[in-house]
Amino acid sequence: MGTSSSASIWLVLLLSAVLANLPFVTERLFVLGPRRMPKRFAWRLLELLVFAAIVVGVGRWLEARGGQVSPQGWQFYAVFGCVFLTLAFPGFVWRYLRRQRTAA
């Protein structure tokens, strides 16, 4: 159980980091959809929420695959949401806070 659960944890962490930053990296809706130029911030928040739900689903699936699924309260989801937003910070900075080059 040690190696398999460790690999599952790293998979969920890596998936979280990638999916948290995807809304800020691409102008396509949900990575595969039509291009929106520029994509509004509300779309990015919706994508972030859907991607967070995907990460929770994958985590629950891996937990069920490895044994018994533990019931989670609102505290777990509140902490998960904060961690997911923290993981999304590099993408947010890249999209909104970096200096844009002016056409010279």
Image: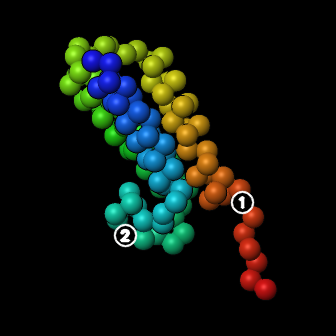
Q: Circle 2 sits on which residue? A: 34
Residue at horizontal 33%, vertical 30%?
A: 8
The amino acid marked with disc number 1 is: Arg
Q: Would residue 47 appear left or right of 3 to someone viewing this image?
A: right
Count neighbours of disc 1 (C-alpha within 10 A) and say few if under 14, some if 14 to 19, many if 20 or more: few
Q: Position of residue 99 (x, y in %)?
A: 75, 64
Q: Is residue 19 depicted above or below 96 in this figure? A: above
Q: Is residue 16 depicted above or below 69 in this figure? A: below
Q: Would residue 69 appear left or right of 52 to someone viewing this image?
A: left
Q: Earlier in the sequence, mark 2 or mark 1?
A: 2
Q: Quadrant of residue 12?
A: top left
Q: Quadrant of residue 71?
A: top left
C-alpha gap between disc 2 and disc 1: 25 Å
Q: Position of residue 31 (x, y in %)?
A: 39, 60
Residue 20 vs residue 30, the one in the foreground:
20
Count neighbours of disc 2 (C-alpha within 10 A) and say few if under 14, some if 14 to 19, many if 20 or more: few
The amino acid marked with disc number 2 is: Pro
Q: Secondary structure at mark 1?
A: loop
